[in-house]
Image: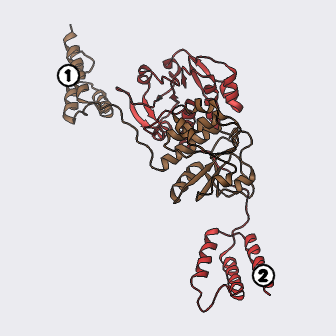
Chain colours: A brown, B red
Amino acid sequence: MLCRPSHPGNIGAAARAMKTMGLADLRLVEPERYPAPEADWMATNAVDVLKGATLHASLEDSIRDCVAAFAMSARPREWSPQVLDARSAAARAMALEGDVAFVFGNETAGLTNEEVFACQYLVHIPASAEFSSLNLAQAVQVIAYDWRQALGGFEVQPRAPEGLVADVAAVQGALAHWQEVLVGIGYLDPAAPKKLMPRLNQLANRARLTEEEIHILRGIARAVAKSKP
Amino acid sequence: MLCRPSHPGNIGAAARAMKTMGLADLRLVEPERYPAPEADWMATNAVDVLKGATLHASLEDSIRDCVAAFAMSARPREWSPQVLDARSAAARAMALEGDVAFVFGNETAGLTNEEVFACQYLVHIPASAEFSSLNLAQAVQVIAYDWRQALGGFEVQPRAPEGLVADVAAVQGALAHWQEVLVGIGYLDPAAPKKLMPRLNQLANRARLTEEEIHILRGIARAVAKSKP
């Protein structure tokens, strides 16, 4: 819910922030200028969320079907409702049964005291004391992100499958092969081996080598052995 | 670190996102247009971070003093480095000793494969499969926020002090007072009290009444008792 936003670009950017986090119910209270082309530009692929936004004459009107409203503010207020940080607010929103609203004020003036009092919680995004005011759409992004994370989050696609991790015997075999080659080229002195092989062993384990990589490393070892004059 | 950003406004908005989270080391690789007035406008009070940004000819040059670079991408890559979600990446960045970089690509094209390969981690912000591309500066905001939270976060200022919580005896005294008044006005039937007082007791405990509120509630009870004809 955006109260009296001045810049239509921020409305579009807020719609985009919401859609990337799977949220769609955008409500606008007396936007200064809307609809507007800047809103469409900033929404990019979230124009559906933007077009689905509902317009309201007041905050009270816009939250009447919600079980709780969370007022976003960068500054504390006297007589404010209960104060929560963003992550705790997301957890609280999760725990409530029914729809909840996160309420963002105007870019410059924020929410009025009356608007804050109409809400059940006052939420701060923990920010630097030196400069604590996030851009409106960026604040929407943080809240949408934390809310989504509280809901269980979206899955992150793992990287493309990278082949089977080699078994212990294959790794030890490759290390033995390299040991032989390193002795052969005079880099490893069997009489004074220092900690070379334990170090390479540690490296190989940490790297979680794949079977294909074992083939490559053995291939290099063979090539090294052959290249010796 | 922003690689080849097209829109100077995004550079400014990224600087603002960083400063609100207490970060200051902004690095730019071949920005399309910079410096630019839009960057200053979007930075608002973070113009110092913007002015302190360093310019680099390549990603490799810009991360040479870092112990790890985290490539931001909305899509998986073949041959990518280890994949992490944003929150895990923030924790990993915390755990590493030395400077780390979060690397963001161009608004439209993202990072090239070569740039991703130059990094040690590939990071996705978990987002909707339907539309997973966050606005550049909003992605910077999410990462800066998660990183700051991983670092321990900033404190949230509690609301103005609201007086001492009343002790148990004071709360029970007020409830007993109200019970007397409710019987007096005929709302509570002592012969069939149902669960009225346990319900009010539960409400009073949940509300964590202050001493001042106890005075107010007792004052109302007295006024109710007096108003009875």
- Front position in the image: A29 or A150: A29
Q: Work out whether residue B148 can be spotted.
A: no
**Which of label 1 and label 2 is nearer to you?**
2
Q: Residue at x 60, y 35 (%)?
A: A12
Displayed quadrant of residue A165: top left
Q: Residue at x 22, y 29 (%)?
A: A211
Quadrant in which the C terminus of chain A is drawn: top left
The relative height of residue B180 versus residue B93 in the rendered view (above or below) is below
| Residue A72 x %, y % | 65, 48
Q: Secondary structure at mark 2?
A: helix
Asked if badges 1 and 2 are on one and the same chain, I answer: no
For disc 2, the chain is B
- Front position in the image: B100 or B170: B170
Displayed quadrant of residue A82: bottom right
Q: Tag count in the figure? A: 2
| Residue B204 x %, y % | 64, 73
- Front position in the image: B135 or A224: B135
* Amino acid carrying mark 2 in the image: Arg
| Residue B101 x %, y % | 52, 29
Q: Which residue is mark 2?
A: B222
Quick one: which residue is furthest to the top in this view?
A229
Q: Secondary structure at mark 1?
A: helix
| Residue A90 x %, y % | 54, 51
**Mark identifier at residue B163:** none
Q: Residue at x 65, y 39 (%)?
A: A136
Q: Which residue is mark 1?
A: A180
Do the numbered discs 1 and 2 sit on residues whose CB atoms are within 8 Å?
Answer: no
